[in-house]
Amino acid sequence: MPMKNNREYREMVLEVMAIEEPQEEDRKTVAGYATTFNEPYVLYEDGDIVFREQVAPGAFAEADMTDTIMQYNHEGRVFARITNGTLRVKPDERGLYIEADLGGTEIGRELYDEIRGGYTDKMSFGFIVSDDEQLRTNAEDGRVDVLRTITGISKLFDVSAVSIPANDGTSIGAQTRGRIDGVIEEVRAERLEVERLNLEREKVKARVRALGGNV
């Protein structure tokens, strides 16, 4: 999936559901969460280096959501949008709640039927990060865990119903990709330095033993 202006996408195993309550005949309303708060998910793995991510409450406080749209897999036709009143997006205590009326187009009504039938039940969102924090933890077994907390989002482009959410299909913005690459190189450099020091230590021990000393 192409990225523009450091746009990132997160495909989450979260529900979107058709609202079965009595509605006007031409309304086909769905609701769900595009993301939740303070629930870490795996963003990327490289051997025993794991990058996790979570969205902090308040991350959407300054987000531009003036023309957010709803799509399917972030592509193609628009099913609903904020500017014409068919899409409502609002952060609550759990996460980013969305509600959309899909009754305005034929393809929207088809998507509503797919959601109601349980064929499509996952959500995603496209955004630009303005602020984040990073915490790195080194375990005794050599595993490195990096947790990125998104604390600010400047722009919410779209929310999408998705067919198969998967971490390996998630698009990562250039800045995030750069940070990940930087951490990987840093960890590898640290491990090479440890190996070098251990090798030097073994050489010193070998020379001491050769001279009849104890180590």
Image: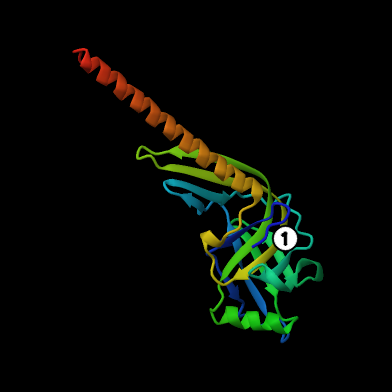
Is residue 156 found left or right of 45 in the rendered image?
Answer: right
On screen, residue 201 above or below 127 = above
On screen, residue 22 above or below 97 = below
Determine which residue is flagged by label 1.
157
Percent across and percent down for residue 45 are 47, 51
Instruction: Please report the residue visible at 63 percent of the width from the left and 43 percent of the height from the top.
Output: 132
| Residue lying farthest to the right in this orientation | 84
Q: Quadrant of residue 210?
A: top left
Asked if one can make out residue 65 in the rendered structure from this viewpoint, the answer is yes
Percent across and percent down for residue 57 are 61, 50
Decide which of 191, 56 is in the foreground and name it: 191
Way the structure is coloured = rainbow
Residue type beneath disc 1: Phe
Label 1: which secondary element:
strand
On screen, residue 176 above or below 75 = above
Percent across and percent down for residue 93 are 60, 55
On screen, residue 49 above or below 160 = above
Q: Total label count?
A: 1
User: In which quadrant of the rendered image does the N terminus lie?
Assistant: bottom right
Instruction: Please report the residue visible at 52 percent of the width from the left and 45 percent of the height from the top.
Output: 147
Decide which of 19, 169 is in the foreground and name it: 169
- Few, some or many C-alpha atoms within 10 Å of disc 1 (few <14, some 14-19, many ≥20)? many
Percent across and percent down for residue 120 are 56, 75
Decide which of 81, 43 is in the foreground and name it: 43
Decide which of 58, 121 is in the foreground and name it: 121
